[in-house]
Amino acid sequence: TMTHLRLLVNFFVAVMLGLLFYGGGNEGSRTLDNYNLLFACLIHNMMTPMMITILTFPTEMMILQKEHFNRWYSLKSYFISITIVDIPVTVVSCFLFSILVYLISGQPSDINRFNMFFSISLLIVYVAMSFGLMIGAIFDVVNGTFLGPTLSVPLMMFAGYGVNLRDMPKYLKWGTYISYLRYGLEGYVSAIYGYGRD
């Protein structure tokens, strides 16, 4: 089922990333590697829930249109119910991913830092799911599958990957303020390296 697949993907990617960046979280000489790990976590937490939502929502949309047309329930109650039903799976899969990556990659043994890391991951997942819902509501599966990652690339660039935000041309700086990935990456860096870390 989709629930098992979500858990399996989060487990597999977490172990793979953790082993790829094994022990780099506490080594000062591997700070750039650790930054790349944080960016990889950001991309995973964006792409996985966004693509699952893009792939599943258009089929739900046909049922929703029929049932809403028959006045069985409102759109508001539908979205509230699918959000509430999805909370346990989303939280468990995000927690599984976060704790595995955090421990295997050797991040600081501080519960507050882990809580920040996990909370930021969960927020990124929910924003990505919302982005996926928007794309899935507007486009069919084929176009949504193409446009989701395509529209995410500028958000990645505006997050500061590849170009330092200070060096970005002034006419493109506006993009950094609308990129939720920028705030997610800054949150990750702050959680791992901020707050008086030695």
Image (cartoon, rainbow, N blue to C red):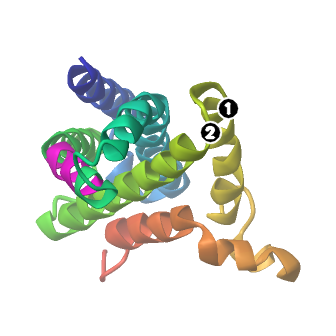
Q: Few, some or many C-alpha atoms within 10 Å of disc 2 (few <14, some 14-19, many ≥20)?
A: some
Question: In this rendering, would 75 be left or right of 130?
Answer: left
Q: Please give the name of the residue rendered at 41% of the width and 49% of the height, measured from the top-left corner.
A: 129
Residue 17 point in image, percent of width and height: 40, 34
Segment colored magenta = 79-87
Location of residue 52 by image quarter? top left
Query: Magenta stretch: dominant SS?
Result: helix
Q: Please give the name of the residue rendered at 43% of the width and 54% of the height, measured from the top-left corner.
A: 130
Residue 83 inside the magenta-drawn segment: yes
Number of numbered markers = 2
Pointer 2: what residue? Answer: 139
Q: Can residue 60 be seen in this snapshot? A: yes
Q: Looking at the picture, tell me which residue is in the foreground, 151 or 99.
A: 151
Amino acid of disc 1: Asn
Pointer 1: what residue? Answer: 143
Compared with residue 16, is residue 189 higher up or lower down, i.e. above or below? below
Location of residue 89 by image quarter? top left
Q: Please give the name of the residue rendered at 49% of the width and 46% of the height, measured from the top-left corner.
A: 132
